[in-house]
Amino acid sequence: MKLSGAMAAGLALLLTLATAPAAAADPQPQPQPEQAQDPIQTLATNFQLPFPCGQSWTGNSSASSAHQSYEIDFNRGSTADADLGDPVVAAAAGTVAISAHQGSTNGFGNLVKIDHGGGWSTYYAHLNTRSVSAGQSVSQGQRIGTLGNTSRPGNNISPHLHYEVRLGSSYPSNIQRAVFNGVTFGYPQQTLTSRNCGGSANPYTPEQVCGSGYNVIDSAGLTGGTVYLLYNTGNGNNCVVTLKSTSVGTASAVSAYLEVQGSTRRTDSGNFGYYAGPVTAQAASTCVKWGGSAGSSRYDSPFEHCG
């Protein structure tokens, strides 16, 4: 059969469509290049308060005329010397870059500087004592010294910890906002509870173990934990607890004791997963001796806190 001109044209069009290559599919979206992590996010992930786990400290960035931007002075207690000699610990793991008295160089007195990699460093100034050396590797929560009031000659200051976080070397613009436990410090002033538990998250605090009404009045760092002395103003009782920071959740040797002057020592010891204690005793207006251990590391106080 002979097709008409119109029919032939239509058939040719259909054949052309049928044999034409399929249209290319929509291109797939290309993966975006990975974004470099914000340095402040890295800091937030790693840094903790420079004091033993469970302690509460008030930081202030505006009380000193010598401050540059985001530096913080830390204190606790109701009197100027209340925290003199309290342990200071590393905010994050790193390598000690400086452990020295600065003499007349600046107002830092006994200074420990820790390098954390990536240009990050932390400064711990005015220390009463230093317990680490330059070049030493330290772990998060490791004791590096005690709080003090050392400075340049003739510069009389009250005891406090001067703390800085720096990124790079262009001072003072390299001083960064401090971040603790993933949260930026609430400038200019904030009171925080330390979650610096030696890199192992102990879910308990001294206050939780001792109970309502107790507040930490002293502490001592151990290799593998911290021993705390607490006081309850409502009933005049002291309480001692030792919190573990290594082998947390696994039974291991740990102890806590409290001895009121003139009375028999009370002790709790054994293989525990999280803490030893609480050990409590009535001690209003009476001196106490307290301490504890984690593994082979132990602390024993003299008779003190007699008020």
Image (cartoon, helix red, strand yellow):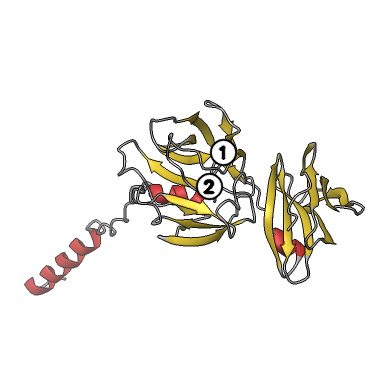
Q: Residue at x 57, y 44 (%)?
A: 147
Which residue lies most toward the left here? 5
Q: Quadrant of the N terminus?
A: bottom left
Quick check: 20 left or right of 75?
Answer: left
Which residue lies most toward the right here? 264
Q: Where is residue 116 in the image (x, y as percent from the top left)?
A: 48, 37
Q: How many marks?
A: 2
**Type of amino acid at the residue the image marks with label 2:** Pro
Q: Name the residue under label 1.
A: 128
Q: Nearer the viewer, residue 115 or 157?
A: 157
Mark 1 Cα shell of 10 Å, populated few (<14), some (14-19), many (≥20): many
Q: Where is residue 266 in the image (x, y as percent from the top left)?
A: 89, 53
Q: In which quarter of the image is the C terminus?
A: bottom right
**Type of amino acid at the residue the image marks with label 1:** Asn
Q: Position of residue 72 (x, y in %)?
A: 44, 51
State yes or no: discs 1 and 2 in contact (Cβ < 8 Å): yes
Q: Nearer the N terminus, badge 1 or badge 2? A: 1
Considering the numbered disc 1 on the image, is that residue within a helix, a strand or a loop? loop
The residues bearing labels 1 and 2 have C-alpha atoms spaced at a distance of 9 Å
Residue 174 figure quarter: top left
Q: Position of residue 257 (x, y in %)?
A: 83, 50
Mark number displayed over residue 159 = 2
Quick check: 291 left or right of 180?
Answer: right
Mark 2 Cα shell of 10 Å, populated few (<14), some (14-19), many (≥20): many
Residue 97 visible (yes or no): yes
Which residue lies most toward the front here? 154
Is 163 situated above or below 281?
Answer: above
